[in-house]
Structures are given as structure tokens and as C-alpha cells.
Image (tube, rainbow, N blue to C red):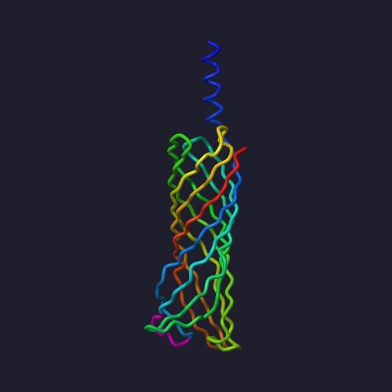
């Protein structure tokens, strides 16, 4: 009887909700694309190709582990400066640099196997952005901005527990992000606008501590 009670207590403890905090680092790989450019008062000018350089990502996350099969994550990341180039044929011209700071929410389903807890997830986030124009490309009097917007993502990865108590875990995560940003260049009463896809593939490695 005492053995059964002990086993039941262990099962209940294992199934109890837990919280975790952690930090991660990785790489953000942007996809190339093209966008329509509109000239205020004159309509569409045409398309322009662009390429954004890959960049580092650093962040902190908090996890609510409902049980061993379901978890929810909130994370705040900093995607470091990426060089934004406009392309014309084989010619590539630097237009500026931009950074992103996303606050994301993710729901995940786990399938634990031993020390591994592989998962699939999906979520959304809000992306704050800043843009630093290149004065060799833009006229010095031109103001250039990139707006903030929502984004969506899917991810897959695993927690790898490093201790018998399963309080420390190595996290490996692969994520695909869909998000867009409007870019506006204004000089006097004239403005050019376009919408840039900032879709990206993100890989990160991190450490978590479970309470």
C-alpha cells in the first residue's frame, strides 16, 4: 500500500504544472524577395528586388509547462542589425540597416521520450523595428522608416534534460516566421512606399531552468 501511494505521489508530482525561465542565442535567416513601390500621387512605379543579410538573435523566455505534453512560452528577443540591400540585376546597393525586437507567444505539444521532450508549436508575436538609412543611397534630406507589425510562426524542437531532477534543460528550436513591414521614404511632399516580406528561418540554442 505504501509503495502504491509513493508511486501515485510521484506521478502527481511529475504531472504538476511547472514554470521555467531561460535564455537563447541563434541565427535569423531572411528570405530574399521583391516588393511593389508606390509613388504618392502617381501610383505604382514597379517592383524592386531586395535582400536582407542574416543576423544574430538573442533572447529570454518564460515557459509554463502545464504537464509533460503541453506548454506555453512567452519570449522577448532582439534580432541584431541586418543590412538591407536593393537589387537591380547583378547590382546590389545597401539601402540601410534594420533591427527587430519581437515579443512572441507560442503554444506547444510535447511527446516526451526519456531525457528528451520533442515538440511542435505555433504562435504569434508583435515586432518592433528601427531603420537606419544609408546616406550614400538615400538623399540626406530623405526620412526613411520601417513600421512595426504582427507576425506568426510555427516551430519544432526539443528540451533535453541535463539532470535527474529535470530542472535544467538544453533547448534546441527551429522556427519559421511570417511577417511584413511597410517602408516609407519621404522627401518634402514626395513619398515612396512599399511592403517588405521579412519572412525568416530561425535557429536557436538555449538553456532553461524549471522551478
Tell me where residue 199 sits by quadrant: bottom left
Q: How many marks?
A: 0
The residue depicted at 50 percent of the width and 43 percent of the height is 159
Q: Is residue 107 left or right of residue 128?
A: left
Please give the name of the residue rendered at 58% of the width and 58% of the height, measured from the top-left corner: 58
The residue that appears at 44% across and 88% down in the rendered structure is: 42
Asked whether residue 134 is drawn in magenta, I would say no
Task: Point out the residue furthest to the top here.
Answer: 1
Q: Main secondary structure of the magenta part?
A: strand
Q: Is residue 101 above or below residue 63?
A: below
Position of residue 71 relative to residue 44, above or below, is: above
43 is within the stretch colored magenta: yes
Q: Position of residue 169 (x, y in %)?
A: 55, 42
Q: Quadrant of the C terminus?
A: top right
Q: Position of residue 10 (x, y in %)?
A: 54, 24
**What residue is rendered at 52% in x and 39% in y?**
161
Residue 131 in the image: state x and y as whole percent: 57, 74
Observer-nearest residue: 206 or 148? Answer: 206
> Looking at the image, which is closer to me, 106 or 68?
68
In terms of depth relative to the viewer, which is nearer, 118 or 110? Answer: 118
The picture places residue 207, in percent across and down from the top left corner, at 57, 47
Residue segment shown in magenta? 41-48
- Which picture quadrant has residue 100? bottom right
In the drawing, does residue 31 fall left or right of residue 126? left
Amino acid at each position: 500500500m505504501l509503495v502504491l501511494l509513493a508511486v501515485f505521489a510521484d506521478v502527481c508530482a511529475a504531472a504538476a504544472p511547472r514554470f521555467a525561465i531561460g535564455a537563447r542565442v541563434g541565427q535569423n535567416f531572411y528570405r530574399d524577395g521583391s516588393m511593389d513601390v508606390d509613388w504618392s500621387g502617381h501610383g505604382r512605379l514597379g517592383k524592386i528586388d531586395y535582400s536582407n543579410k542574416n543576423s544574430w538573435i538573442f533572447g529570454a523566455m518564460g515557459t509554463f509547462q502545464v504537464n509533460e505534453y503541453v506548454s506555453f512560452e512567452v519570449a522577448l528577443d532582439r534580432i541584431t542589425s541586418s543590412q538591407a540591400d536593393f537589387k537591380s540585376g547583378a547590382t546590389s546597393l545597401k539601402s540601410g540597416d534594420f533591427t527587430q525586437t519581437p515579443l512572441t507567444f507560442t503554444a506547444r505539444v510535447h511527446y516526451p521520450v526519456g531525457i528528451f521532450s520533442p515538440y511542435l508549436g505555433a504562435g504569434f508575436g508583435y515586432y518592433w523595428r528601427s531603420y537606419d538609412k544609408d546616406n550614400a543611397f538615400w538623399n540626406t534630406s530623405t526620412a526613411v522608416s520601417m513600421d512595426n507589425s504582427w507576425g506568426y510562426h510555427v516551430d519544432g524542437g526539443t528540451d533535453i534534460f541535463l539532470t535527474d531532477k529535470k530542472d535544467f534543460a538544453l533547448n534546441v528550436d527551429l522556427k519559421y516566421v511570417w511577417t511584413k513591414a511597410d517602408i516609407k521614404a519621404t522627401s518634402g511632399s514626395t513619398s515612396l512606399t512599399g511592403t517588405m516580406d521579412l519572412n525568416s528561418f530561425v535557429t536557436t540554442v538555449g538553456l532553461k531552468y524549471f522551478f
